[in-house]
Image: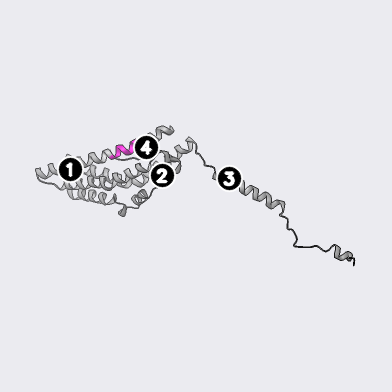
Amino acid sequence: MAKSPRAAYRPTGWPVLRTPRWMLAAAAVLVAGLVLAAIPHRPSAAQRAADLSGMVHDLTIDIESCAGGVTDSLTALQAIESGASDDVKTAVKIANTATANCAPGNNMQMEDLVQYQVPESLASFHLEAAVNDLVTWAFPLAQRVQSDVASRVAATTPAAIDSTSAQLLRDQQAMDAQRARIDQAFTSASAALSARVAPPSLPI
């Protein structure tokens, strides 16, 4: 029995869906973008120099209140020793306040310093060690110096003055040696990048 013309043209099976060309083009662009994103980006020397400058700027802000306290403490000590001032009580207060200010738990800037992340572009210079050295410069080395200043200012007998002065000298030498390590790390990175970026500002 012959099939009717209507039955002969009846479609069989599921219809085939065709992907629009615009979707294929969009997919191709997306894949290309993902490939480009996966390719490691090497920043230029100028970009790395800018990152180094920004890093030093951030670290200087983080350490400035502690570093300023060291300067204030030593200035107060010098005034007492030179006879320019006899206000021992104020000098001790300056040193004790500065000592507390170098502790991360007492100072938000110091907390920021402890949590600081070195830019990825500077990873080859291993400056995370220099950041740790900067934290150590403040806590506990600068703290010890400022505590020594308070003890030296409060000393009244020749024996106490000699003892506290000797301790202050030892702790100042340790603090200065730490600063030299920090300076060397940043000076080396700056020289490699021809950046002319000075290390974070610390009292000498």
x and y percentages locating residue 180 in the rendered image? 30, 37
Query: How far, Cα to Cα, is label 2 from label 4?
Result: 12 Å
Q: Counting residues from the N terminus, which is met first, the one under dot 1 or under dot 2?
A: 2
Identify the amino acid type marked 1.
Gln
- Image coloring type: one colour
Identify the amino acid type marked 4.
Phe
Main SS of the magenta part reads helix
Asked where in the image residue 179 lies, by quadrant, the reply is top left
Q: Counting residues from the N terminus, which is met first, the one under dot 1 or under dot 3?
A: 3
Q: Secondary structure at mark 1?
A: helix
Query: How far, Cα to Cα, is label 1 from label 2?
Result: 35 Å
Residue receiving disc 2: 118
Residue receiving disc 1: 167
Q: Secondary structure at mark 3?
A: helix
Front disc: 1 or 3: 3
Residue receiving disc 4: 186
Query: How far, Cα to Cα, is label 1 from label 3?
Result: 61 Å
**Figure check: 113 above or below 125:** below
Q: Residue at x 68, y 49 (%)?
A: 25
Task: Decide: few, some or many residues near mark 2? Use Cα within 10 Å; few <14, some 14-19, many ≥20.
Answer: some
Depth order, front residue of 48/10: 10
Residues marked 1 and 3 touching at CB (< 8 Å)? no
Specify start and end residues of the magenta stretch as a single range: 178-184
Q: Secondary structure at mark 2?
A: loop
Kindly tell me whether residue 78 is visible in this rendering: no
Q: Counting residues from the N terminus, which is met first, the one under dot 4 or under dot 1?
A: 1
